[in-house]
């Protein structure tokens, strides 16, 4: 585009006007949707032009088009960040001063977004030079801002000054800072500096600005400009309180929160003792509460006021003050924090009390925003204090505690939900979620040592009443959903989706567990009896839905989720029941026994048909799975007589445990056999219930002795019904049954059990694949189905290989080696079957490879080679360009899944060199795994394409394997033929420019390994990468650069000229150092080229010095030890900060 000044030359007025006109025309064209591409190119050229500052300044000062001024500000921002390295100190300072002056001079401009952009530019440029500017420079900038914020130049300028500080704080905050192409250390230095030296000052400026306009706002009966100043000051104060402070230590006795998931956001404010005088003893909290209270009273008749900006900003700030915690409250004055919270609660309580009146007012049209903020304030207070302190806060001014208020408030919300049973989320939905999070914050165990939060008697009684109301509401919702034909939220809500809310309900129930357990027992018994008495007379649908809801609630109350570990009996149940109870009279035993007896009724065909719908059975199976993890045959019991041991002993192996276990197994078999097609029910049975039972060896000992378990195993082997299960469920069931073999008395018995369970399936595959007419009948559906099912079952068994059963599973896989190869050839066009074959082999090899003796390893390796060869011969060139787009996409997806399985196979083989449990792990006669991988790479690489690497999971697996191979077996990769090596390194080049940082990091690690191998080998007089590293002439006679030379260029190009995450700089340094050592002459030449391309003499000298320091500073040597890598990382960081900015303008 013509009209821009050349670098270093003054622009005349005509050029500037021409440039301005072009940008204005481009902005207008975009708004009018006319010739947008050309207009965007014009605007882009302004940003990309070297030193466009005169033109941008002219546009900002003279253009009448607001969008043109906005684009000019953006161009200053982009150009200045790009060219920062060669701007003079005076230019940098004057540019920031110009932006600040422009904002102040045009403070009354109606185009606020332009002012905001210029403020943002000033903030970003100030941060870019933060580590360069002297304290005097910074004070000069901030003096100008301070004068504005204090209102010396009027209200509009005061507003503009506060907005600038808001932009500045945002720019220095890690979560909202702009990308500058600089290392993370730069941003961290800036953040620490601002926090230490200026952040508190900015807060005081904002506070004083708000104070200066308070009286005028209160006295005025109409909207005045001071309102926006006060609102902006509140926003800035809130932003500063949300800062990620470095000081995160907690004062003694201060609650540290919990790891429980929350639906509502609650950020703790922990600025440290340096802020004590400003936030705690400064007195402006009382002023803030008084201001809000006065305005609230003044505009009480104006319904809109609660949602106007100043009201919203003030409430947010007040709520944030509730989260203030940590060492800011001095440890020798524990009452200080309580006094702070009491002051807040005294101001906030009018937002939420009395709850019934507040709820009624909202239903009559009042805004709910204030009430919701009151709930958020309670959440914040609950997060930073303990239940006892929380409850005591209100007792100093009311006859009841804060817990009682919380219960009453929650009750009103629940009543509103019951009354307005709407599927649309209303204010009461949001209030319920916030208040449930408040309960969670209060009732989750305070410490990680298992202690429980004990409530005072008054709070406990209120909590019991609240839980009764919650259960009533849930039962009402369940009952109302029974006859709805539409897909209501309640019917569609899965167990998992309800889990979060039910977990909070459970915490409330446990706070009054001695009351709530009998309540649940009574409710469950009533509905059980109602079903029994009304069979054939009363429609049971409503009752069944209520039972479904009760099972979910009860399961959460009496047991926790295991999350991979055996959950303990909840502390509330252990503590709050008498120690001298007989087991039969224990409330939890009574409740659990009632539910188990109810579940046992599902074994009766008539009851199953009339009562136990698939949906109800899902809840039954879910409950039993959750309950059994905690209570069934636990090994935690001891001789002490307490509530915990009473429960564990009652359901232990010497009491009712075996009887209940037998019932559970029979119910599981019923769920699998009697409910065909119910995938959700079968998934719960296979993945949760049965899988959980076999995880504990002492339970497996009893399982394998049960007739019901043998019935399950026989049904699995022979029942056609179970062949109709989802294949993933069949795989899980096979894995579970094989895992139960750990309960056998010895290894021989375990192996025999596995052979009996799986042997006939292997025999079927052997016989089927040996049939002379197998190829002709293989494509029939009644053949493909059992073959697919058996492969999935074999995969499930293979994936559970353990030392006790390893021998039997090896024999199982060995017996089907030839059939698997036959199946792979016969079903080469059936992608689903091919995938099942590959996944079985992967699971088998992965489970076996670490245990195999040398001869067995050789057998497995040869089998894998045959498999790879066969797959390769059947699949090279399989994807044809003549296919339609949809078929091509489908073919690529199938190929992606197959190749990912092959990559996993190669990774499993690699693991033999890392983990080997065989008796002779050092035997020399064993097959060299690296040779297998070498062979596998030759077979797999022709099947790879860059398109396949666009699949994220495949891409990750491939580069993970490649990185591992180059780090562990670089000599093997070096032996690849030229074509395969080029293909592998071509994918490495692709990965180096991938958008996923983890992929790029793995590629850089691979490059480090490759270059380090070559450098170490050649330094010892060996060949290293040989011809791959040397430059060669291609068939056309053109010189082709060596692979290390190519990647040296690529890494330098990435670091100096491309966009990347600062977190990659260390990995890039580790790759760059050995590349430079390998290709020192090329590095010198590339450096010289960079220097010669630099026309500016000052920058040329600066670049020369930087390149020199990169390879010599801090005593860098030519070794590849850990210390040298650390030194080079430091050198590279300094180098990039110094030169990257101006190099990107070349």
Image (cartoon, helix red, strand yellow):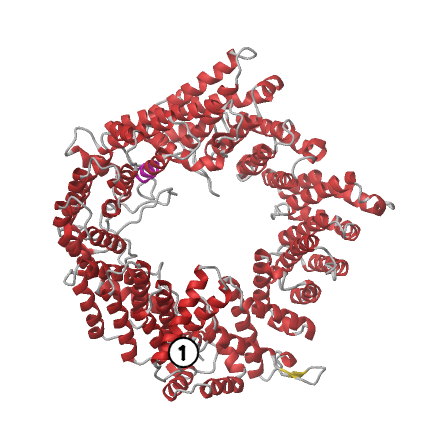
Q: Secondary structure at mark 1?
A: loop
Position of residue 649 relative to residue 25, above or below, is above
Return the x and y of residue 1137 as percentages of the image width and height.
37, 75
Q: In the rendered view, does 149 fall on the left or right side of 940?
A: left
Check if residue 440 falls in the magenta segment.
Answer: yes
Q: Residue at x 33, y 68 (%)?
A: 63
* Magenta stretch, main secondary structure class: helix
Position of residue 383 relative to residue 45, above or below, is above
Q: Residue at x 22, y 64 (%)?
A: 198
Does residue 811 appear in the picture of this structure?
A: no
In the image, 261 versus 7, the foreground residue is 7
Report the label total.
1
Check if residue 4 falls in the magenta segment.
Answer: no
Residue at label 1?
4
In the image, 771 versus 212, the foreground residue is 212
Q: Quadrant of the C terminus?
A: bottom left
Q: Residue at x 50, y 64 (%)?
A: 35
What stretch of residues is rendered in magenta? 436-444
Return the x and y of residue 210 as percentages of the image width and height.
17, 53
Q: In the rendered view, does 260 fall on the left or right side of 247?
A: right
Q: In the rendered view, does 671 fall on the left or right side of 770?
A: left
């Amino acid at each position: 585009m013509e009209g821009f000044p050349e670098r270093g030359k003054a622009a005349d007025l005509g050029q500037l006007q021409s440039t301005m006109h072009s940008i204005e025309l481009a902005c207008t064209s975009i708004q009018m949707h006319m010739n947008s591409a050309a207009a965007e190119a014009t605007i882009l050229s302004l940003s990309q032009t070297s030193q466009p500052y005169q033109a941008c300044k002219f546009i900002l000062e003279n253009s009448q088009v607001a969008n043109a001024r906005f684009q000019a500000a953006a161009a200053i921002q982009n150009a200045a960040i790009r060219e920062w390295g060669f701007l003079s100190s005076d230019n940098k300072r004057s540019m920031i001063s110009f932006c600040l002056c422009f904002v102040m001079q045009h403070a009354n401009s109606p185009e606020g977004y332009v002012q905001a952009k210029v403020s943002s530019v000033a903030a970003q440029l100030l941060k870019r030079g933060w580590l360069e500017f002297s304290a005097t420079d910074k004070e000069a900038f901030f003096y100008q801002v301070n004068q504005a914020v204090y209102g010396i130049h009027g209200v509009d300028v005061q507003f503009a000054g506060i907005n600038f500080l808001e932009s500045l704080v945002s720019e220095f905050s890690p979560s909202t800072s702009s990308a500058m192409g600089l290392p993370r250390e730069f941003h961290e230095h800036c953040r620490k500096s601002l926090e230490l030296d200026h952040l508190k000052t900015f807060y005081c400026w904002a506070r004083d600005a708000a104070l200066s306009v308070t009286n005028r706002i209160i006295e005025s009966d109409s909207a005045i400009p001071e309102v926006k100043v006060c609102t902006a000051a509140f926003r800035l104060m809130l932003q500063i309180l949300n800062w990620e402070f470095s000081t995160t230590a907690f004062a003694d006795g201060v609650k540290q929160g919990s790891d429980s998931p929350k639906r509502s956001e609650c950020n703790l404010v922990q600025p440290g003792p340096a802020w004590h005088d400003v936030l705690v003893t400064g007195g402006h909290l009382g002023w803030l509460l008084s201001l809000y209270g006065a305005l609230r009273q003044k505009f009480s008749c104006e319904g809109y006021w609660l949602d106007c900006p100043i009201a919203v900003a003030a409430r947010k700030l007040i709520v944030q003050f509730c989260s203030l915690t940590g060492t800011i409250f001095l440890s020798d004055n524990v009452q200080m924090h309580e006094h702070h919270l009491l002051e807040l609660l005294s101001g906030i309580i009018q937002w939420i009390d009395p709850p019934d009146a507040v709820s009624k007012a909202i239903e009559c049209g009042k805004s709910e925003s204030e009430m919701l903020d009151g709930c958020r304030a309670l959440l914040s207070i609950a997060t930073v204090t303990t239940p006892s302190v929380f409850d005591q806060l209100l007792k100093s001014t009311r006859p009841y505690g804060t817990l009682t208020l919380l219960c009453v408030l929650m009750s009103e919300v629940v009543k509103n939900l019951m009354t307005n049973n709407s599927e649309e989320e209303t204010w009461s939905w949001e209030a319920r979620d916030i208040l449930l999070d408040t309960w969670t914050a209060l009732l989750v165990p305070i410490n990680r040592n298992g202690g429980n939060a004990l409530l005072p008697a008054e709070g406990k009684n209120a909590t019991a009443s609240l839980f009764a109301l919650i259960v009533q509401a849930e039962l009402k919702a369940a009952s109302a959903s029974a006859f709805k034909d539409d897909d209501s939220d309640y019917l569609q809500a899965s167990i998992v989706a309800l889990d979060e809310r039910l977990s909070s309900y459970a915490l409330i129930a446990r706070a009054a567990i001695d009351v709530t357990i009998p309540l649940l027992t009574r409710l469950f018994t009533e509905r059980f009896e109602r079903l029994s008495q009304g069979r054939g007379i009363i429609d049971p649908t409503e009752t069944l839905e209520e039972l479904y809801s009760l099972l979910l609630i009860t399961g959460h109350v009496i047991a926790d989720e295991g999350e991979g570990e055996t959950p303990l009996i909840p502390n509330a149940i252990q503590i709050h029941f008498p120690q001298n109870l007989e087991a039969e009279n224990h409330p939890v035993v009574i409740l659990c026994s009632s539910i188990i007896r109810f579940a046992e009724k599902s074994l009766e065909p008539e009851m199953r048909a009339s009562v136990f719908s698939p949906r109800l059975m899902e809840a039954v199976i879910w409950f039993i799975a959750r309950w059994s993890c905690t209570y069934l045959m636990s090994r935690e019991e001891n001789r002490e007589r307490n509530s915990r041991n009473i429960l564990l002993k009652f359901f232990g192996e010497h009491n009712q445990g075996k009887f209940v276990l037998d019932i559970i197994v029979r119910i599981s078999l019923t769920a699998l056999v009697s409910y065909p097609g119910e995938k959700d029910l079968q998934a719960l049975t296979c993945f949760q219930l049965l899988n959980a039972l076999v995880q504990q060896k002492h339970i497996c000992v009893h399982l394998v002795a049960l007739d019901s378990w043998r019935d399950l195993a026989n049904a699995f082997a022979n029942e056609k019904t179970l062949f109709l299960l989802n294949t993933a469920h069949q795989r899980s069931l096979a894995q579970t049954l094989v895992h139960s073999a750990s309960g056998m008395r010895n290894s021989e018995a375990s192996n025999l059990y596995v052979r009996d369970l799986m042997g006939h399936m292997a025999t079927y595959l052997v016989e089927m694949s040996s049939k002379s007419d197998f190829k002709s009948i293989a494509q029939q559906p009644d053949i493909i189905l059992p073959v697919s099912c058996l492969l999935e079952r074999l995969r499930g068994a293979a994936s559970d290989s353990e030392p006790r059963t390893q021998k039997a599973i090896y024999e199982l896989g060995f017996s089907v080696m030839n059939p698997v190869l036959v199946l792979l050839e016969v079903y080469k066009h059936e992608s689903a079957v091919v995938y099942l074959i590959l996944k079985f082999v992967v699971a088998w090899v992965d489970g076996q490879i670490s245990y195999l003796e040398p001869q067995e390893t050789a057998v497995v390796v040869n089998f894998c080679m045959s498999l790879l060869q066969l797959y390769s011969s059947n699949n090279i060139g399989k994807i044809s360009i003549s296919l339609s787009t949809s078929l091509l996409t489908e073919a690529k997806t199938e190929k992606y899944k197959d190749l990912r399985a092959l990559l996993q196979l190669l990774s499993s083989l690699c693991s033999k060199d890392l983990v080997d449990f065989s008796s002779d792990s050092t035997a020399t006669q064993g097959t060299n795994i690296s040779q297998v991988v070498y062979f596998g790479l030759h077979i797999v690489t022709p099947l790879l394409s860059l398109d396949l690497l666009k699949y994220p999971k495949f891409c990750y697996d491939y580069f993970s394997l490649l990185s591992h191979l180059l780090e562990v077996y670089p000599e093997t990769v070096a032996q690849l033929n030229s074509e395969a090596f080029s293909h592998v390194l071509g994918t490495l080049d692709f990965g180096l420019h991938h958008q996923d940082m983890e992929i790029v990091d793995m590629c850089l690690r691979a490059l480090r390994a490759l270059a380090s191998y070559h450098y170490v080998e050649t330094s010892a007089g060996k060949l290293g990468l040989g011809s791959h590293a040397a430059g060669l002439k291609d068939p056309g006679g053109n010189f082709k650069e060596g692979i290390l030379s190519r990647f040296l260029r690529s890494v330098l190009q990435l670091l100096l000229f491309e966009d990347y995450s600062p977190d990659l700089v260390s990995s890039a340094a580790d790759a760059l150092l050995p590349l430079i050592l390998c290709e020192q002459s090329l590095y010198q030449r590339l450096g010289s080229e960079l220097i010669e391309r630099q026309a500016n003499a000052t920058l040329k000298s600066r670049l020369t010095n930087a390149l020199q320091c990169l390879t010599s500073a801090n005593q860098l040597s030519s070794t590849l030890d850990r210390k040298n890598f650390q030194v080079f990382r430091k050198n590279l960081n300094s180098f990039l900060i110094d030169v990257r900015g101006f190099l990107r303008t070349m």
